[in-house]
Amino acid sequence: MTFTKREEWKKTILIAYPSKFAVSEALSLAESAGYNVIRTVSQKNITRSKFGIGKGKAEEVKEIVSNLEIDTIIFDEMLKPSQQYNLARLCKVEIIDREKLILEIFLERATTNESKIQVKLAQLKYDIVRVKEKTRLAKLGEQPGFYGLGKYDADIHLLDIKRRTTLLKKKLKSEERKRALHRVQRLNNKLPLIALAGYTSAGKTTLFNLLSEEKKDTSKSVFTTLTTYTRSFLIKDRKVLISDTIGFISRLPPYMIEAFKSTLSELNYADIILLVIDVSEDSLVIRKKLKSSLEILSRLELPLDKCILVLNKIDRVKSNEIKDKLNDLVITRGMSQVVSISAELGYNIPRLMEIIENRINDPQIY
């Protein structure tokens, strides 16, 4: 997504948990979607019944909206439709919850047929819950026709969503068949597959470009990659395939993982998974991001012994810090190996290649 002037972005309040990690990630998501966050409001519990936040905090947000002429409120949590509606009605602006914010980024960044279908399916899953809420509000005599909820035409909308979902699922099956054919060809050629996985913005695509000699776009923004790209490279004259996959993020709704399952399925068929972590970040942030990544791998039923933990961006860390950070990552037990690299500078890449070579030459794999 490209923007010319930050001043042209929507003026936004961010409501988030009072943690440096949560606020930093939410700000990154908001910026990636083109929102200008000019005030952050935090509260320990942002899943309360009526507004998501407490009544007093909601009144505070309403006053800020009025005083600063805010266009939008970003709520860094997955809100129930009723909470979204109540807060929108109180503050008289659109409420963008965490799900919708991620979907906006997905919709902007999807470039291939497969990723566009996956994002549209996730969008429909999000929409159908809110259409059902329109029906409930209408029966209560409410008027849900403002601030993002749309006019009351729930029955027609529901039928349309179901029809489009069925059509998109058929198209996705067709894309999956194409992927399966490529997979069969790879298996017939006995080509080892290495898949890159990890938190968004960890440097997976930079590493992919380095190994495959590609020039895929890289960015500090989240979700630069929304589809799987597979290319080949040589390890001592042996042809090997490498796949770059969508980045992970914390609190990603299960249905979004489900929508991208065909893309993430490459991880299931990989011989080696390089789990890339940005080691230049604070230890607490690294632990949280690694935990989120491992939770998603667990949902995909991927064994840890397939994973090699790749600590990237080592050029931005003092040498004595690396050991301390690694000692903090007790969660890595069960992984086969750990290697520190700089994908940007090419540091320690020969050691990574050596580890990969030893693994693909292991008779238990081939």
Image (tube, rainbow, N blue to C red):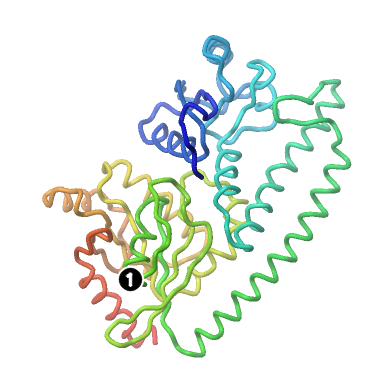
Residue found at the very far left of the displayed protein: 320
Report the side of 332 relative to 5 (left or right). Answer: left
Mark 1, residue position: 211
- Depth order, front residue of 196/326: 196
Q: Position of residue 363 (x, y in %)?
A: 34, 88
Give me the residue at 51% from left, 45% from top.
1
Residue 317 percent across, percent down from the top left:
18, 48
Is 358 on the left-hand or right-hand side of 321?
Answer: right
Which residue appears at 59% of the width and 65% of the height?
262
Looking at the image, residue 122 lies above or below residue 339: above
Which quadrant of the figure has residue 339?
bottom left
Q: Is residue 292 left or right of residue 253?
A: left
Q: Nearer the viewer, residue 42 or 71?
A: 71
Give the residue drawn at x 27%, y 81%: 358
Q: Residues within 10 Å of mark 1 (few under 14, many from 20)?
A: many
Secondary structure found at label 1: helix
Q: Position of residue 158 (x, y in %)?
A: 83, 44
- Relative side of 195 to 181, left or right: left
Looking at the picture, tell me which residue is in the foreground, 69 or 134: 69
- Place of residue 179 in the rendered image (x, y in percent of width and height, measured from the top left): 59, 74
The residue closer to the viewer here, 63 or 81, is 63
